[in-house]
Amino acid sequence: MKFPWWLSILIGAAFYGLCTWLLPNMETQNAGLNRFFAAAPDLAPVLSIPFLLLGAKLLYDLPSADRNEKEDSEKGKPK
């Protein structure tokens, strides 16, 4: 499954925002989940960096993919 690079960046930013601002303010009946929510701001970079790195990789791979598609389309053309 291939998706645009910017979608990965948005998911990483959403994870960071969720872990930094939303989860610490939530309360549940489960003590373990409450401890996870309290630790979420510290885990925010760890959870969001993989998505940011994936977005960077997809962006880096983009020009070479476009170049290969152009070369492939030129191979099929008669001279």
Image (tube, rainbow, N blue to C red):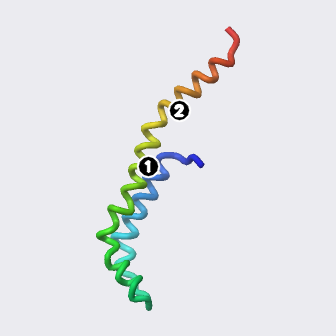
Task: Categorize mark 2 by other alpha carbons within 10 Å: few (<14), some (14-19), many (20+).
Answer: few
Relative to 48, is 33 above or below? below
Q: Is mark 2 on a helix, strand or loop?
A: helix
> Real-space Cα distance between discs 1 and 2?
16 Å
Q: Where is residue 61 in the image (x, y as percent from the top left)?
A: 46, 37
- First in sequence, mark 1 or 2: give its number: 1
Residue 70 vs residue 35, the one in the foreground: 35
Q: Which residue is rendered at x = 39% and y = 49% of the image?
A: 53
Q: Which mark is residue 34?
A: none
Q: Identify the residue under disc 1.
A: 54
Quadrant holding the C terminus: top right
Tell whether 16 sits left or right of 62: left
**Disc 2 residue type?**
Ala
Q: Is mark 1 on a helix, strand or loop?
A: helix
Taking the view exactly as shown, the residue that stands out farthest to the top is 79
**Disc 1 residue type?**
Leu
Task: Categorize mark 1 by other alpha carbons within 10 Å: few (<14), some (14-19), many (20+).
Answer: some
Q: In which quarter of the image is residue 21?
A: bottom left
Relative to 65, is 3 above or below? below
Residues marked 1 and 2 touching at CB (< 8 Å) = no
Q: Which residue is rendered at x = 44% and y = 91% of the image?
A: 29
Q: Identify the residue under disc 2.
A: 65
